[in-house]
Amino acid sequence: MKPFPFADYLVFAIFAVAVGLTVGGALIAALSTRIIRGVSGLMISCVGLAGLYYFLNSPFLALMEILIYVGAVCVTIVFGVMLSEPDEPAGEEKRRHARLWSGGALAVSALVFAGVAWLSLHGPWTAPAKLVSDGSVRAVGLSLLTTYSLPFELISAVLLVAILGALVIARSGRTKE
Amino acid sequence: MSLNYAELFRALRPEASLVLGALVALGLDLAVFRRHTLAERLRLALWIGALAVGVAIVHVAYGARGTVFGGVLVFDNLAVLTRLGVLGLALLTLGVTSGARVLRHPAEYVAILLFATTGFTLMAAANQLLLAFLAIELASLSLYILAGYDKSSPASAEAALKYFLFGGMSAAFLLFGFSLIYGLTGSIELPEIAKQLGVAGLNPLVIVALVMILVAFGFKAAAAPFHLWAPDAYQGAPVPSAALIASASKLAGFALFARLLWHGLGPVSGSVATFQGAPGWLPVAAVVALASMLLGNLGALAQSNLRRLLAYSAIAHAGVLLLGVIVAGPRGLGSGVGPLFYYAATYGIATVGAFGVIAVLERADPSGCQNITDLAGLYRRSPLLAGCLAVFILSLAGIPPLAGFFGKFLVFAAALKIGGVAGVAGWLAFIAIGLSGVALYYYLIVLKQALVAKGDASAPPIATPLLPALVLLVCAALLVALGLAPSVVIRLL
């Protein structure tokens, strides 16, 4: 069968879109001063991440990323923003030499990123002899209920603690003395 | 891989009883005791919690041995003893809670404390990266909540926030390190990782992974230079929470740390036998240990707040515990881990006791136990508290015949066996011995206030309730008994 013309370019373009969404969304989330824009940036970044998971042969993870992070986590944050106080105006930058510090932090993190990226590209990764699982819902479900049943159960305990803690800490009653 | 769910359940009966205890405490509180006073609800929840921990202790003592569920969990001597140790420390912490100021939502407090203990017991036995990470996070998440539990105090919120931000960041480091290890070895089981690393040896990516993992554990253990959260967390958190953070979490954390480093990453350990030793994680751990001992002991000198002083002394003790990790492994994690376990367990008992004394003082006078000078005249106001505090502080300082002395002695002796005075470990031991003198100075300042200083003559005597008094006496008795007969513990490993 003759492949679709420009198929490689098409795949690359989709990959580039996914990367762009991830990075762009993250930048919006980190740089915006209004919280609602930050949440939107997080959503965009999560959609991009889902695309990256798809390229890594994990359609199930991609689906879950959209369902849980975009569909549940970000929507919950939006509800939280809606129900709480309106945006406070951005405060004055108090720290002196803030630009200097952030520039230094940026340089250090860029160096670390470059170093780890270079190492990752040249690292002696072990390639599995065969695909461990096809990443399908069936394979993930089977391993969650057999090999990884203990971590799976433990996650439920972690979530229970998180719910308990959220109720106890966030419910009314934190008073200022 | 053979999966035997019945075997898994039998092995996890202690965890099951802890979780069941937490749920029963929550349910009974909701269904029956809603209308009672906070103190009554706390007492009921504490008894349920104590029962659950007691059942768990019995299950651990007569429970499974060997590897379980395809090697996910391993129940060797270290695991079983650490599980018993954290359960015992949790029981003592429950006793401390009964003597502390009563906070709102007492049943939830006990439930979350039991969940944290579940995390500790799993950390003690985890033999797989995924389970180890989840156990750490279950314990950490519970501890963040416990640190922020006092809603009437802004300091408590600050403690929880700082602890949470640092802890969350260290979790990210840990996960990144683990993912690199998985990518390089293709496995998350510690024995398989050790086998693969033994073949591949050290390469730059392994070094990055090691750095990430050491940074993460440095944060969790409050070792310098990753200690910044500790003083605020110890100062602001409710007293029983601080006791748990300082005792059981340290014991479980260092047991897991030793197992992960020696069983999983042992082939890339490097060497500290000489100053020109092979590269690996041992030299890095030695540097972190040195920094912690120096910064903790010197920082403690400047403190006037009792709880901050305990925090800085905890940083110093984390340095000695790291030395214990360094000396644990070369002959395989058999008897070599004895000094580490003994030190961590006895340090935990002494800290729980010290925080127990603070809890009773704070209950008697909510603003009364901030500074060391507030202890003045304690010997007159409550001879019991002053006497117990003296035992705990002297044990922390390492005065014979208390258990703290033998902990230090065992760790330093083991360190000197590695390469003698020519080795990095030996020099670390010498520096630690020297810094013990510094530590003795600030510990004695506390004792001078409690035992000698006159204080306010009109201050009323402090009545210690029965249960906390019992806990304090048990802690003190344990420190004396273990100090007189350290071989009882050492022989078990």
Image (cartoon, rainbow, N blue to C red):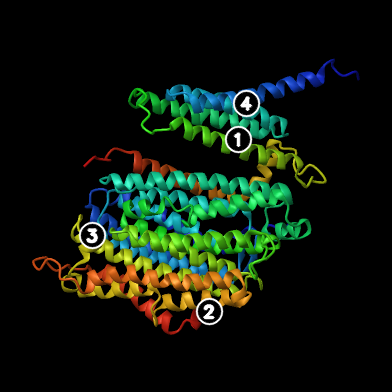
Q: Amino acid at mark 4?
A: Gly
Chain of the residue on which disc 2 is drawn? B
Residue B82 appears in the figure: yes
Does label 2 lie on the same chain as label 1?
no
Q: Which chain does tag 1 point to?
A: A
- Image marks 1 and 4: residues in contact by CB distance under 8 Å: no
Q: Secondary structure at mark 2?
A: helix
Which label number is shown at residue A110?
1
**To which residue does mark 3 refer?**
B369
Residue B11: name its quadrant: bottom right
Of the 4 image quadrants, the one containing the N terminus of chain B is bottom right
User: How far, Cα to Cα, is label 3 from label 1?
Assistant: 47 Å
Mark 1, Cα crowd under 10 Å, few <14 / some 14-19 / many 20+, is few
- As drawn, B41 above or below B262: above
Instruction: Give how far across and how far down residue B206 sits, in percent.
Output: 69, 51
Marked residue nearer the N-terminal end (1 or 4): 4
Q: Which one is in front, A45 or A64?
A: A45
The residue drawn where x is 58% and y is 23% is A24
Q: CA distance from mark 1 to mark 4?
A: 21 Å
